[in-house]
Amino acid sequence: MPAEPRFVVVSPVNDDDTLDRCLAASPDVVSGRIPLRVVRDARSANGVIAEALRRTADGFVVYAHQDVYLPRGFFEQLAARLAVLDELDPAWAVAGPIGRDAAHLTHGTVWSTDRGRVVGAPIARPAAVQCLDECLLILRAGDLALVDLGVPGFHLYGVDLVQMGRLQGRRSYALPLDIVHHAKPITSLGGGYARAHRYMRLKWTARLPMTTLIAPLERVPWKLWKMRLGARLRARFVPMRHDYGQQSDPRRIARELRYE
């Protein structure tokens, strides 16, 4: 039997309570089988990713948000999915559980606590995408050519990594994976998101419009402006319509979904 690929999980952290309830509570992390590198006071997600790629000699870097829970057996599942992907496309760039293609079709699923349900569209095989959700990203160790350290903050770098791969003639993929994203509701698309959106519009002007998982990249960001207003109104006036929240145990959610 071939050896299981080597995985290292890296996460930028600004909330230790969330980390302890979610990512650090993942069974393979708790057991010590899969190492977790926590980065505090990071300036950007791509800075965290670049440092992890430099420090990891072989195998794969799994970049995960602090509010992601990886169910028991996740890394066996991931190893099997990557084996299929390597057969399909040995030069793949980035992979993750959910993304969107140029036709704005979503591929893959994640549980999203802010929605109180599994979101996305189930897939049985790797699906090529033009953006990936940043809650979980898988990259090959040492693959620094994908990382633009100029991307500011912690938004839209999943789009940028995929597009950097495309510049090299490489495709990125959504994989059928089971994860719990214990996300909080989006209350604003201003601030850091707006800055990252502007950076991406300027960087990829020649390729616009470009799909994302939230606000598409356009020369004139009409949809972003509309969605910013919508996010503020929903946060203020629309009540939660499900029983899940940050008090919910992501391990219990994983069991309810039969992920473990």
Image (spheres, rainbow, N blue to C red):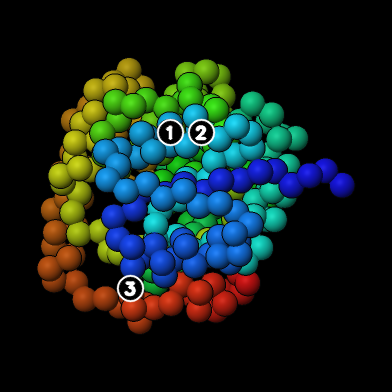
Rendered location of residue 247, percent (x, y)? 34, 78
Could you tell me which quadrant the C terminus lies in? bottom right
In the rendered image, the vertical position of residue 137 relative to residue 31, given as above or below: above
> Residue visible at 70% across and 43% down?
5
182, 97: nearer the viewer: 182
Answer yes or no: is residue 242 visible.
no
Crowd around label 3: few <14 · some 14–19 · many ≥20 (10 Å): some
The kind of residue on which mark 3 rests is Gln
Asked whether the viewer can see residue 195, the reply is yes
Image point 52% across, 18% down: which residue?
A: 168
Residue nearer the viewer, 7 or 116: 7
As measured in the structure, the alpha-carbon distance from the residue carrying label 2 to the one carrying label 3 is 33 Å
Query: Does the residue at mark 2 contact the one at mark 1 (Cβ under 8 Å)?
Result: yes
Which residue is tagged 2?
Answer: 55
Q: Which mark is residue 51?
A: 1
Give the x, y percent position of residue 29. Answer: 55, 60
The residue under label 3 is 246
Identify the image quadrant of residue 72: bottom right
Question: Mark 3 and mark 1: span between their CA atoms?
Answer: 30 Å
- Percent coordinates x, y for residue 45 in the rendering: 35, 40
How many residues crowd mark 2 within 10 Å: few (<14), some (14–19), many (20+)? few
